[in-house]
Amino acid sequence: MAAPLGAFDPLDPPDYEGILDCIHCGICLPQCPSYRVLGLEADSPRGRVYLMRAAAEGRLGLTPALVTHMDRCLGCRACETACPSGVPFGRLLEAVRGQIERRVSRPLGHRLLRTAVLGLFPHPRRLGAALGLLRLYQRLGLSRLVRRLGLLAAFPRLQALERLLPPLPPRGKRLPDRLPATGARRGEVALLAGCVQRLLFPEVNAATARLLARSGFAVTVPEGQGCCGALHLHWGDRQAARALARRNLQAFGGEALVVTNAAGCGTALLEYGDLLPGDAAAAAFNARVRDVSQLLAETAPVPTHPLPLTVTYHDPCHLAHGQRIRAEPLRLLRAIPGLRLVELPEADLCCGSAGVYNLLQPEIADRLLERKLDRIVETGAEVVVSGNPGCLLQLRMGLARRGLGIRAHHPVELLAWSFEGRAPTREG
Ligand code: SF4
Ligand code: SF4
């Protein structure tokens, strides 16, 4: 018997079997950040799956209440880690969001932001031009003025976006298309440069390429690669995500491992097989994707120069829950001489970044960020480390807002500093 559609239409409906996998045990509830903040069953994984089932069985439409509870989900997938029944919550949520975005009328502010974000990210030139204007905006001191006078207070989403924007780095040198291996040669890897990583954290990409080369990999940065599609998946635009997946499959043809240093991008790359069922290249691609921490934990030589810093580690959701990678970044940090690693309580609780969540749900995102900052301060760390640009933007914004002298960096930066005997060059 065909699965019921109920309130959903046949274009990418949520998987009914996956919905039925929920046995209502509630084990996921304490792990869910939105439930921890709001305390409502409908804002828990179990409550959301219940709403999805009611919609699939035609007992509930795509009502404002259903939309609100799906909107408040961070898509962090902590519930998947906790779930003993294997409920594929991330995929269910993406499918439901796709249905909502296509079929439910949204307020103008939401539509404008969605069009701007999804229209910019697949187009490096447009994104570069937008960042050029924002760089000018910061250089002219307009950013300070806007913040001091609270000029965006009437536009909370725009205000959240403006606050999130870090001091933009000067337009950096492009990564070379090819970097030869400097250590004993192990093979070739292809690096995903990423949209946010490439433009806002060029030093992370440069450190990644140098470390991979030092570990014996010839590094290529394939031309023609584009946005991984993570933001489109978060925002329910699976058609656009498919087009981006096809483009990347072509750009990353061949057999080399595909390395990413952005947790959110890695999880999106690993979804290409699901996005393009029956596509042999997409299925094979999944087996080639590696987070940089995985590959370096296996292959990097022992770092050399002492780095006398007290450091704590925040798990990006899409690394810990999306890819189940937790130990490797810690192993890399522990190998650095002189570095003192202190455990972060609730390290795998979302910081509130979650793709564009901090723009769409700024109040909940802020409560999660404040909680994360409290935990970081308790550790006494000078540096908090996390392997995802969204987390770094969120943490840096929060740390700066509180006037804390704590910096936020990607693990590869610390590793590179130790290998190269360099002190940090940019304040986080
Ligand atoms: S994805 Fe995260 S926020 Fe959403 S239901 Fe699961 S644990 Fe909660
Ligand atoms: S842990 Fe899994 S099976 Fe249990 S309530 Fe949560 S989603 Fe359902």
Image (spheres, helix red, strand yellow):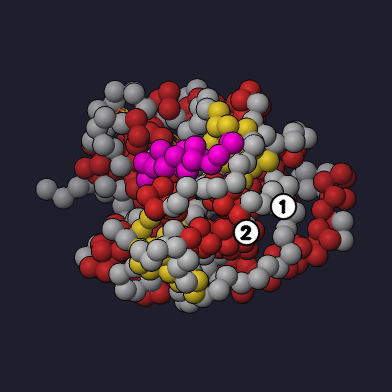
Of the numbered discs 2 and 1, the one sitting upstream in the chain is: 2
Quadrant assignment, res 186: bottom left
Circle 1 packing at 10 Å, graded few (<14), some (14-19), many (20+), is: few
Counting the numbered discs, the total is 2
Q: Which mark is residue 203?
A: 2
Q: Secondary structure at mark 2?
A: helix
Point 26% across, 64% down: residue? 284
Viewer-closest of 73 and 395: 395
Amino acid carrying label 2: it is Glu
Amino acid carrying label 1: it is Thr
Residue linked to disc 1: 425
Point 75% across, 54% down: residue? 167
Q: Is residue 9 visible?
A: no
Kindly report which numbered mark, 2 or 1, lies closer to the viewer in this rendering.
Answer: 1
Segment tinted magenta in the rendering:
322-339
- Residue 86 image point, x, y percent: 26, 36
The answer to whether residue 134 is left or right of residue 102 is right
